[in-house]
Image (cartoon, rainbow, N blue to C red):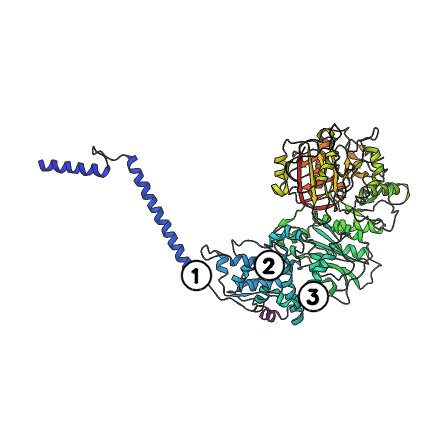
């Protein structure tokens, strides 16, 4: 018994020791739970350790099995254990930027095949995945030789060296495929990140290397773009390229001729008057050169960001080309769909009937070609593939009977009609999408309309009096108002007879863009138009020509150069800035101090937003400007000839659907000349027309604001200056200015909102500030004096009735270098 008791006591003692319970009771759930958590933690830790060991084992196994030697082999359709680059293959694994290829899952996108290869070889053995696995194939091949295909193969074989020169190699591939070289600091700043180019030196190095490849290929082998000698070219260049990449100057004699040709050609199109015209709304770049002697790289380096190029040479010689950016999957920017140019060729052949000899015809390749070119072909001497893809100087050009302004407007109309309702898309468009799109466009309506106008002489710039009954042109049962065209560049006065195509909607859907000839410059109406056009579209230095407008509404006034702001005691007052301006000099600040309302002359200037300080963001500008007024918006245009200009806004900037602001609002220029353009207060009895228009119904801007004798119908819609015909909506009026899509939509939406708000008696001149998340504008209706897009990267300026102001910027659509917003 005593032994038993002792045993039990010993047992209790043991239990108490194990459970840390002095009275020997059973453990509670709260005591057991931590033990369970500890066990779970131990299990999880064991699983993680096992996973790590497994991953480490796989990593080591991959390192052991990793391929270290790679070779180029000839292309074969039956190959399965070969990596194919820069082309398609029915069975093999591919690394290619072409559409409908089987690239590895998880591979980061790139514009060129070289970029894809560089992205793939960065995949390491630790994370593995398809990019790493596919890059273990020891053999690589392609079915052609060009810059991108060669670099794709070379980078795959020479991986460490390729990654050392990654940015230069990526840019080389872009130059070779897209013919786009970043040959200016502006291009490097705006687009260099696409290839990792951070300075212009690397861009020029890439150009030198591409010129070396081209020159040596041309001198030693068959012409580029031909299928012959592909393997021989790879055998020659693959072992030699590394040395040239390390020291391009060692072979300068082999690349210098082509390199000089590209650089000098690029500079030819950079000067004044401007030789490059860009239409962002349809992705069209227009290049003007006297002769087809410029290198392709020199031409297309001015078209970065655009997908269709119209090149115009003297004597009515033209080529329209769909860029290679539409043929592949371009990811760095949105791309417009490729439209089959056959309908445009048919229209041009009908317009040139009787002008061209029978053997000469406008023709183009199918839209599925790598780079279709629309041009006049000699059927007796068809071009070879090398000529079609080579430089323009390598193929003969023949003269057309279509005048240059008509050609530009015709191509614009063709693209606008074919791409109605579409937007550019990042990554491009699949072939199925392009086939479906092109098959569904009813081209016959557009073709018949344009040809009918041409046959009636309405598109002939040499005909000053085309037949327009009651000021309109009747086509297919629809009446279209005669609208003069506002020209893009203040430095280049528009030639007589320039034209523009504009869309006219109907109840049955969008009609094709119809052509309307510009106003005649003869007779009394023409004289009025010339006077107004000169005052608004001429050089900004010719401020004296604005005198007539100034009498009517205050008009422009030269801003004093220095010391204009004075205190009540008559002494000069020096403006005080919260911090130095990155745009304006102190002389500019002093001049603006005299231009603002007198009560604000001595206000301290506080920088609310500066792009150099706060980054490029319209959202940030709105956030910092919320509730802050009045403000001065100052913009510096990019480029050596860029202007400095801006606006004084009386009310705080606020996103919304309507125009707002007061008559204190004005716009100004600081460079090349300091000029203030004040609000043009409407005169009594004009029905809200532009008091300072200075011209009658034929005035250049009367179709927008009812200026002069045109008047305003219903307080918002402009009446036809010709007296008859339907009035186009504001969106169409804005399109006549080639306005950016966001600016045109904002102009139409803002003016429509004002009209819908019951402002029947308001003047069409009362359009001061307009701001949405798509951008901000000053002035209206239908044409902003100043517009900035939602990224503060691009802007536009047009002649504006609100202030009787000309185009403020050097170029109608400009790139923004810097923006500042100051509160007074």
As drawn, 541 above or below 202: above
Q: Are marks 1 and 3 in contact (CB under 8 Å)?
A: no
- The local secondary structure at tag 3 comes to helix
- Magenta stretch: includes residue 809: no
Which is nearer the eye, 790 or 730? Answer: 790
- The local secondary structure at tag 2 comes to helix
As drawn, 229 above or below 491: below
Which span is picked out in magenta? 228-237
The count of marks equals 3
Q: Are marks 1 and 2 in contact (CB under 8 Å)?
A: no
Give the mark nearer the N terminus: 3 vs 2: 2
Would you say residue 101 is visible in this rendering?
Answer: no
Which is nearer the eye, 518 or 266? Answer: 266
User: For residue 345, which quarter of the picture?
Assistant: bottom right
Q: Is residue 57 left or right of residue 792?
A: left
Q: Which residue is mark 3?
A: 257
Give the mark nearer the N terminus: 1 vs 3: 1
As drawn, 82 above or below 565: below
> Of the numbered discs in the image, which one, if any, rests on residue 168?
2
Q: Position of residue 328 (x, y in %)?
A: 62, 56
- The local secondary structure at tag 1 comes to helix
Cα distance between the residues tagged 1 and 2 = 29 Å
Please give the name of the residue rendered at 87% of the width and 47% of the height, measured from the top-left corner. Answer: 466
- Magenta stretch: includes residue 234: yes
Give the mark nearer the N terminus: 1 vs 2: 1
Please give the name of the residue rendered at 11% of the width and 37% of the height, measured from the top-left corner. Answer: 4
Q: Which residue is mark 1?
A: 63
Q: Main secondary structure of the magenta part?
A: helix
């Amino acid at each position: 018994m005593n032994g038993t008791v002792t045993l039990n006591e010993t047992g209790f003692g043991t239990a108490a020791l194990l459970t840390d319970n002095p009275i020997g009771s059973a453990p509670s759930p709260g005591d057991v739970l931590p033990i369970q958590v500890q066990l779970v933690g131990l299990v999880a830790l064991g699983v993680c350790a096992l996973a790590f060991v497994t991953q480490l084992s796989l990593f080591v196994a991959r390192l052991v099995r990793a391929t270290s030697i790679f070779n180029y082999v000839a292309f074969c359709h039956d190959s399965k254990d070969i990596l194919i680059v820069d082309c398609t293959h029915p069975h093999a694994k591919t690394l290619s930027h072409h559409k409908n290829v089987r690239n590895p899952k998880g591979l980061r996108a790139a514009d060129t095949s070289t970029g894809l290869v560089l992205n793939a070889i960065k995949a390491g053995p630790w994370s593995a995945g398809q990019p790493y696995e596919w890059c273990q194939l020891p053999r690589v091949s392609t079915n052609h030789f060009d810059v991108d295909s060669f670099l794709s193969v070379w980078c795959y074989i020479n991986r460490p060296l390729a990654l050392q020169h990654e940015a230069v190699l990526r840019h080389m591939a872009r130059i070779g495929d897209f013919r786009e070289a970043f040959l200016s600091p502006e291009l490097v700043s705006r687009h260099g990140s696409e290839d990792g180019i951070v300075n212009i030196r690397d861009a020029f190095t890439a150009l030198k290397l591409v010129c070396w490849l081209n020159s040596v290929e041309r001198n030693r082998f068959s012409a580029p773009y031909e299928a012959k000698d592909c393997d021989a070219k790879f055998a020659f260049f693959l072992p030699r390229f590394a040395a040239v990449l390390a020291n391009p100057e060692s072979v300068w004699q082999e690349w210098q001729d082509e390199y000089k040709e590209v650089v000098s050609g690029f500079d030819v199109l950079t000067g004044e008057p401007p030789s490059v015209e860009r239409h962002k709304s349809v992705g069209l770049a227009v290049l003007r050169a006297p002769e087809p002697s410029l290198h392709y790289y020199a031409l297309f380096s001015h078209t970065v960001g655009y997908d269709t190029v119209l090149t115009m040479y003297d004597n009515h010689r033209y080529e329209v080309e769909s860029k290679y950016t539409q043929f592949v999957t371009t990811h760095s920017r949105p791309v417009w769909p490729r439209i089959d140019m056959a309908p445009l060729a048919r229209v041009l052949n009908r317009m040139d009937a009787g002008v061209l000899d029978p053997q000469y015809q406008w023709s183009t390749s199918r839209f599925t070609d790598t780079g279709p070119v629309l041009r006049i072909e000699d059927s007796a001497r068809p071009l070879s593939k090398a000529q079609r893809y080579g430089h323009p100087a390598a193929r003969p050009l023949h003269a057309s009977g279509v005048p240059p302004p008509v050609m530009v407007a015709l191509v614009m109309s063709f693209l606008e009609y074919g791409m109605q309702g579409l937007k550019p898309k990042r990554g491009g468009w699949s072939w199925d999408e392009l086939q479906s799109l092109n098959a569904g466009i009813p081209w016959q309506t557009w073709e018949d309309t344009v040809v009918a106008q041409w046959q009636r002489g309405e598109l002939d710039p040499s005909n000053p009096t085309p037949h327009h009954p009651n000021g309109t042109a009747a086509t297919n049962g629809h009446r279209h108002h005669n609208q003069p065209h506002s020209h893009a560049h203040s430095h280049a006065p528009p030639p007589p007879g320039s034209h523009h195509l504009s869309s006219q909607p109907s109840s049955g859907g969008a009609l094709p863009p119809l052509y309307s000839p510009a106003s005649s410059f003869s007779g009394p109406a023409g004289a009025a138009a010339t006077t107004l056009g000169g005052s608004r579209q001429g050089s900004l230095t010719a401020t004296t020509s604005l005198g007539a407008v100034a009498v009517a509404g205050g008009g422009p006034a030269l801003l004093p150069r220095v010391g204009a702001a004075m205190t009540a005691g008559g002494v000069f007052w020096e403006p005080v800035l919260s911090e130095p301006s990155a745009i304006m000099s102190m002389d500019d600040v002093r001049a603006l101090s005299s231009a603002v309302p007198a009560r604000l002359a001595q206000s301290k200037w506080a920088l609310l937003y500066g792009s150099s300080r706060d980054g490029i963001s319209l959202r940030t500008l709105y956030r910092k400007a919320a509730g802050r007024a009045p403000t001065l918006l100052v913009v510096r245009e990019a480029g050596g000839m860029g202007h400095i200009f801006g606006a004084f806004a009386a009310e705080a900037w606020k996103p919304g659907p309507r125009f707002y602001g007061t008559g204190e609002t004005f716009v100004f220029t600081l460079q090349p000349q300091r000029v203030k353009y004040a609000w043009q207060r409407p005169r009594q009895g004009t029905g809200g027309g532009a008091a300072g228009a200075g011209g009658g119904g034929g005035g250049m801007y009367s179709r927008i604001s009812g200026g002069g004798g045109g008047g305003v119908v219903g307080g918002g819609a402009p009446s036809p200056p010709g007296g008859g015909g339907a009035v186009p909506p504001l969106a169409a009026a804005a399109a006549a200015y080639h306005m950016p899509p966001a600016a045109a939509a904002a102009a139409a939406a803002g003016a429509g909102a004002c009209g819908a708000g019951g402002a029947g008696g308001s003047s069409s001149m009362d359009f001061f500030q307009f701001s949405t998340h798509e951008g901000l504008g000053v002035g209206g209706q239908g044409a902003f004096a100043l517009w900035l897009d939602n990224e503060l990267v691009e802007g536009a300026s047009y002649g504006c009735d609100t202030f009787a102001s000309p185009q403020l910027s050097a170029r109608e659509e400009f790139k923004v270098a810097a923006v500042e917003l100051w509160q007074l």
